[in-house]
């Protein structure tokens, strides 16, 4: 494969990722325009809506402006009101990241990997800029700089991650030297820092995955339990079949956010749906919230024995550390075992706290005017408490049965 064909292939793959991301909301919205509105009106409105959703999901904030009449209806004041919308529908961000990982793995097997990687990310940046410019509208304006930078960063993280993952697996090829170099650098760290660092990174990521997995199961169970209430909310919206499909797609777009909110609830601090609100194991204080059927799973009262939710991060740290302990023990000398295991437990908590804090930051932001400027968990608080809880469980898991 020559340079031109390799570059064109990489550019085409980046184009496909953008088309998939925008096409997911654009197809049902176009059907809504064609069948519900009889193809009457400006289709570009639906294009801008699809572009807005894609950009928002990739971390681009918007500035919305509403006129005085609408502002008065919403109870947010007199003159023209402007407010930020930054709460990202993370399904689109995760989709870009996942597809970027797949592209990165294929790029690693290409004879010209660095060229393909650069062209892929650069093409994505150009397309993101064009989409941002096409979405410009006085009533809902994306932040231009974020539209140029943020989506390529999300996609680029996936591409680079997939690239290095493939390089690590393909130890027989020339790209295996990348993984070998990383392992050599880690092994060169002072004893026992390298072994502890590797274990803490893997254990912290695994603990985060455990907490998110449990929160996903809880959200799925709650959706089933509150099915009747959700149906009632669908009927109250009176949006028709296609409108119901659109509402469902919006909820699916925000489903990862809700899962992360549930994870923050398990950690303890919980989350908010508006200023001066709180949903946590120790109590719930809510005002009026949007009538989305998905939000019917949010508890309105104190959950009985809800404080037991904090056992999830504790047990996650303990179980993961128990599985990671044997391999770590083989790399430690008898004289430094206990102290190194305690440090590994603390480090595992710090890694998990960092990951959960970043996820909480991604799942929080402004969702509208007035009290909706604060939605989601507090990243610093959730991350800090998750670090303490997971570290406590991990320390017990690491130091248990050191002496056999």
Image (spheres, grey):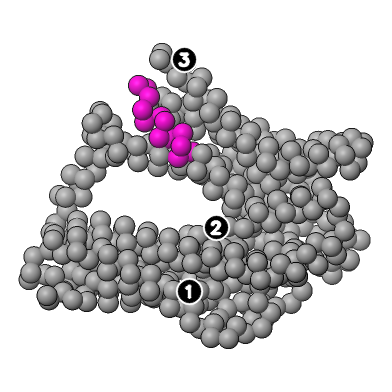
Foreground of the two, 233 or 156: 233
> Does 29 sit left or right of 132 as displayed?
right
- CA distance for labels 3 and 1: 51 Å
Work out which quarter of the rendered image holds the N terminus and state it. Answer: top left
Sequence-first tag of 2 and 3: 3
Labelled disc at residue 4: 3
Stretch in magenta: 100-112
| Residue tagged 2 | 362
Tell me the element at label 1. helix
- CA distance for labels 1 and 2: 16 Å
Q: Mark 1 against mark 2, which lies toward the viewer?
A: 1
> Does 310 sit left or right of 67 as displayed?
left
| Residue tagged 1 | 267
User: Looking at the picture, how far across and down is residue 258, in whole percent?
Assistant: 60, 63
Badge 2 local density, few (<14 within 10 Å), some, or many (20+)? many
Q: Are marks 3 and 1 in contact (CB under 8 Å)?
A: no
Badge 1 local density, few (<14 within 10 Å), some, or many (20+)? many
Q: Quadrant of residue 138?
A: top right
Q: Are marks 2 and 3 in contact (CB under 8 Å)?
A: no
Q: Quadrant of residue 375?
A: bottom right
In the displayed structure, would residue 29 be above or below residue 125? below
């Amino acid at each position: 494969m020559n340079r031109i064909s390799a570059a064109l292939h990489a550019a085409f793959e980046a184009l496909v990722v953008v088309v998939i991301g925008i096409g997911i909301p654009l197809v049902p919205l176009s059907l809504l325009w064609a069948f519900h509105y009889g193809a009457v009106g400006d289709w570009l409105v639906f294009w801008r809506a699809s572009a807005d959703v894609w950009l928002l999901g990739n971390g681009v904030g918007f500035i919305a402006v509403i006129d005085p009449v609408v502002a008065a209806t919403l109870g947010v004041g007199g003159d023209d009101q402007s407010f930020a919308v930054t709460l990202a529908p993370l399904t689109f961000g995760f989709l870009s990241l996942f597809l970027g990982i797949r592209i990165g793995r294929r790029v690693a097997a290409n004879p010209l990997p660095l060229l393909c990687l650069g062209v892929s990310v650069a093409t994505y940046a150009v397309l993101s800029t064009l989409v941002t410019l096409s979405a410009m509208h006085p009533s809902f304006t994306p932040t231009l700089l974020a539209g140029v930078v943020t989506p390529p960063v999300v996609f680029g993280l996936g591409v680079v991650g997939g690239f290095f993952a493939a390089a690590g697996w393909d130890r027989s090829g020339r790209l295996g030297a990348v993984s070998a170099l990383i392992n050599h650098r880690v092994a060169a760290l002072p004893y026992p820092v390298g072994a502890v660092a590797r274990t803490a990174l893997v254990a912290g990521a695994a603990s985060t995955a455990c907490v998110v997995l449990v929160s996903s199961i809880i959200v799925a169970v709650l959706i089933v339990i509150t099915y009747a209430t959700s149906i009632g909310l669908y009927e109250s919206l009176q949006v028709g079949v296609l409108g119901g499909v659109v509402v469902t797609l919006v909820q699916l777009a925000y489903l990862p956010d809700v899962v992360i909110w549930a994870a923050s609830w398990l950690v303890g601090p919980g989350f908010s749906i508006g200023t001066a609100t709180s949903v946590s194991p120790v109590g719930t204080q809510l005002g009026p919230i949007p009538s989305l059927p998905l939000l019917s799973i949010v508890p309105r009262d104190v959950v009985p024995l809800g404080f037991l939710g904090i056992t999830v991060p504790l047990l996650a740290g303990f179980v993961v550390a128990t599985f990671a302990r044997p391999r770590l023990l083989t790399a430690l000398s008898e004289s430094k075992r206990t102290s190194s295991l305690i440090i590994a437990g603390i480090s595992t908590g710090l890694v998990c706290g960092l990951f959960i804090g970043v996820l909480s930051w991604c799942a929080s932001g402004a969702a509208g005017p007035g009290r909706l400027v604060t939605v989601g968990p507090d990243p610093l608080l959730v991350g800090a408490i998750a670090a303490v809880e997971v570290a406590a469980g991990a320390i017990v898991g690491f130091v248990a049965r050191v002496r056999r």
